[in-house]
Amino acid sequence: MRLRFLPLVLFIGSLLVGAPLAGWAQVRFTLSGYIRAADSKEVLPGATVAAPALGLGATTDSTGFYSVALPAGTQNLVVSFIGYQTLTRTITLTKNQRLSFSLPASTNELGEVVVQGSATLEQKLRAPQMSVEHLTATEAKLLPALFGEVDILKTLQLKPGVQNGGEGTSGLFVRGGSADQNLFLLDDAVVYNPSHLFGLFSVFNSDAVQSVDLYKGGFPAQFGGRLSSVVDVRTREGNPEKIGVSGGIGLISSRLTVEGPIKKGKGSFLVSGRRTYFDVFTRQINKLNDSDPDYNPIPDYYFYDFNLKANYKLGDRDQVFLTGYLGRDIFGFNSTNGFNFDFSWGNTVGALRWNHVFSPKFFVNTTVSTTGYKYQIGNKLDQFGFGISSDIKDQAIRTDFDYLLNDHHTFKFGATVTNHQFGVGRLNANSGDGTLNINSDVAYTGQEAAVYASDNFRVNKDLQLDYGLRLTGFQSGSDHYGGIEPRLAARYSLTDKTSLKLSYAQMYQYVHLVTNSGATLPTDIWYPSRLNVKPQRSQQVATGVSFLLGKGKFLLTDEVYYKWASNQVDFRDGAQLFANSDLDAEFLFGKGWSYGNEIYLEKKEGRTTGWIGYTLAWTKRKFPPQRGTTGINNGATFYPTYDRRHNLTVVVLHQLSTRFNLTSSFVFSSGNPTTLPQSRFIYQDTYGSDYSVVPIYPERNSYRLASYHRLDLGIVYKFRPRHGERDLTLSIYNAYNHRNPYFVYFDQIKDEETNLITGYRARQVSLFPVIPALTYNFKF
Amino acid sequence: MMFSTRLRLLALVPAVFAAASCGLQKDIDVELPVGPAQIVVECYLEDGVIPRLTVTETAPYLSTTEEISLPDVAVVLTLPNGTRDTLQYAPGQDRRTRKIYTHISKRRLSARPGDTFQLDITDKQGRHLTGTATMPTAIPIQAVEWEFNDKPEDQRQAYLITRFQDPANTADFYRFQIHKSRINTDPESDYSVDDRLTNGQLVTLGTSYRFNPQDTLIVTLYHLDQPYYQFMQSADDARDANGNPFAQPSAVKSTVQGGVGVFTVLNYQRKTLILK
């Protein structure tokens, strides 16, 4: 038990040891400022400023601000960011200095297109943080997409260690974690359901997104609350120089974005929206068939979302940022026989962040946010009405301090408090005559809090540590839980081009997704930790080696990870998961393990860029007999549906000319585990009912579907208009039209004359054939 | 939650149609593990009715084997007073229900609410199936009402509502059926409910506008024991999981031990009415 506090002791000890190191350093000054895009003047979070000769550098934070301590004298700086040209600059430091940079975009129709990424790769090689993927919306937009709908989450699925939840879906399963173990953040506010259209599209509009960071392990101490990943999405801030309009017209949706200065030099705004238009066509089809009494109208379906971002400088030291998101999916069905069905769901997010710079070395971001997810279903069948709904609402405040003590130590510390309101289930049913009137409401509250501190400790040129501690607590009613979450990431440079890395993280998750489908559905319910529902916990160790190859053009990384988790959540067979005031009793708890090896080769420089990722992985779950049940799978270990033994992705982006981009992505993965019936019996039932064949299922997920492979191709053609920019994007999904397995079912073979069963057969269903899609994008 | 997976399936209906029309379905070869066959029993006892039951065994799912009866099993029904009634192997079809049976008793059954019966089946392979069932109490139907819509005469249809009082102190389970004209045809309406949200209340079950003037309807309200209710639910879930990629395959919760199936005592209230 005492060992649990060892990291805390080491942490405090290192502060004591680290402080004198400041005295060893020669005279140093702080260089700080912002890095922006040259064209739009938007800030670039995640950009780097480095002094390669010294092995020193810094990365911009979410406001585009950087701060680095450098020795006095003349220094050569390299400023870089993915998708932008790298700048080199020589400066002479004689005092603390403020210096901002503007990076020109690397892809535009006027110049030679050369993606400069070597400095980024070198920075990645030298960073102690491992198991992280950074992706910009610019990159994602170049890649081919299903129905031409650019989806930043689906692009993340092409990274090693990340699995999808099924053909075409945007769900993420990271290093053996389930779909609810990902923390989705939109400008520091939590997004509970990141999907539209039952998971086929993500809620993140690529026009409003600047970049996304995916953490698969080695989690920095400022993140917590989910076991398996952090998806940190940052939205664009809008052009601070001039009003601009951009958008696109696609196969299933259109997008429009307006951005511009609020007041020049003070602030900017961005408003972006998109909407699908299936319903426009289906309504017309329904109208044309209105007179046909036998016609069954096609259900209405559409989704829309709006993003708002604004920022304003209150002075030299203060700036505020406002983020808003509203998204809804609407599904409706009105039949002629009196059955009406309305189903809507969506997220609402608002966040206000205040950035205050105490000094170039010390600044703070304080964010108040509110987030909510809700679904509601209303049915009407003649005189009967039936409605169900569920929601979760959070109000949160967090503050994050960054303090650059010297060139050896950069501290981050902060705290966060969240108030959760769980509307687990509301149900009402009534009849027109008032004889039926049922109301049920199951609701809870929960308070979650955390404090953290971490130190990025540059021991010497070769060794760098990023270690920290996060203390978390959760309360729901009279039930309390707490956790100590040590975090460690270390990098040791064997040579200038080779780094060894190591990380460890412990995570607690206090809110759970109530689902038994294995996939994320809009009707899934969030549920707090309570007396009989303990928090989920995981620990992960990872180690890896990175090589900079080909004169810095390639980065080859090999990472091995092992993750073990307790209090994993599932539900007993036939669990009553809705409007159940005793839902605690339906939970089953188990253990999980996942381990694997991820090999990743990436190239970010030159006309041809891209990556190759290969993952060899195992994911296992075990739910022993408990609570009057035999557990799951009779207590034996089983593979969840997202266990894939092999996963290979190859992504190539090639600049054919200044106006043509060719892109392709290829995916191969082992088949999903699935459960197929082993045997059958005939069930006659009582009075009148026809007989049926009932399947008997053996071990869970004991059968594997056939392997999955798919090639997508894309062509981007840039026009040369008088004003602004135009391009036409052709995406070809599943280019060689492979019939990938979606699911398998068993069917009866019947004699056509007698209608008697003559045998049984297994049928494989595929979802998407080859799908070409054309999207027209404009900007002026 | 099966409800939510059905919602998603509903949304994917166009895609599944597309799958069918674009040749996105195909037969595949699947090698399934072969396990030992289990005895399957279906037995619904009723007061005043000669006990009949069906004994078969499970078959590998993709085999062409027909479900066969098992003549060599010994079937013994133990009555509440301890009397052992050995049922004879005499396959036939029950005229009342049109169900096939394999074993039949020689005596009519006398059963009262609270009576407990036992079933014991053995065969020469050493398989041994047992089951226990207690007759539930009767829940009277308080009212059956119908009302026609306001449409023209040739389009007039009625909905039907049925009311009953749920007991307050027990967890109760019901099955509600409406048959048209004959009890041994497919029911027009058939669903099962529990009293989780209506405990102790006057419960109303209903239909949409779907019945024509002069229809003869037979309304049946079964009061079920929990094991039988769970068996029906789990059999439904198991069937639904075949072909639904979002459903979690569910194990069938038999009411018997040592095999698969259901052994229960039915207690129902039935009303016949003509819509006028």
Image (spheres, helix red, strand yellow):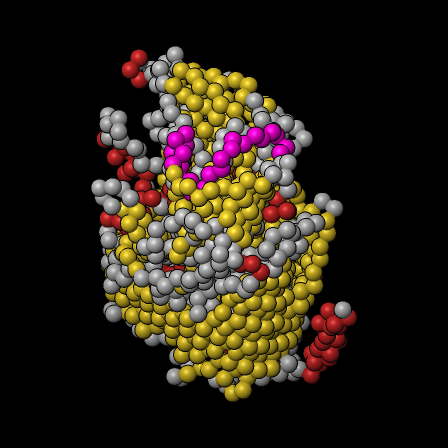
Task: Residue at 38%, 67% (x, y): give it.
Answer: A669
Residue B251 makes an appearance in the image: no
Q: Main secondary structure of the magenta part?
A: loop
Instruction: State the residue in front, A349 or B72.
Output: B72
Residue shown at the point (63%, 27%) measured from the top left = B167
At 46% from the left and 82% from the top, the residue drawn is: A547
In the rendered image, the quadrant that contains the N terminus of chain A is bottom right
Q: Which residues are magenta?
A: B93-115
> Would you say residue B102 sits in the magenta stretch?
yes
Near-viewer residue (A738 or B46): B46
Relative to residue B226, is residue A432 depicted above or below? above
Q: Is residue B212 above or below residue A451?
A: above
Residue B182: x and y, percent?
Answer: 38, 25
Image location (x, y in percent) of residue A252: 31, 47
- Percent position of residue A568, x then y: 59, 58
Q: Does residue A742 appear in this view?
A: yes
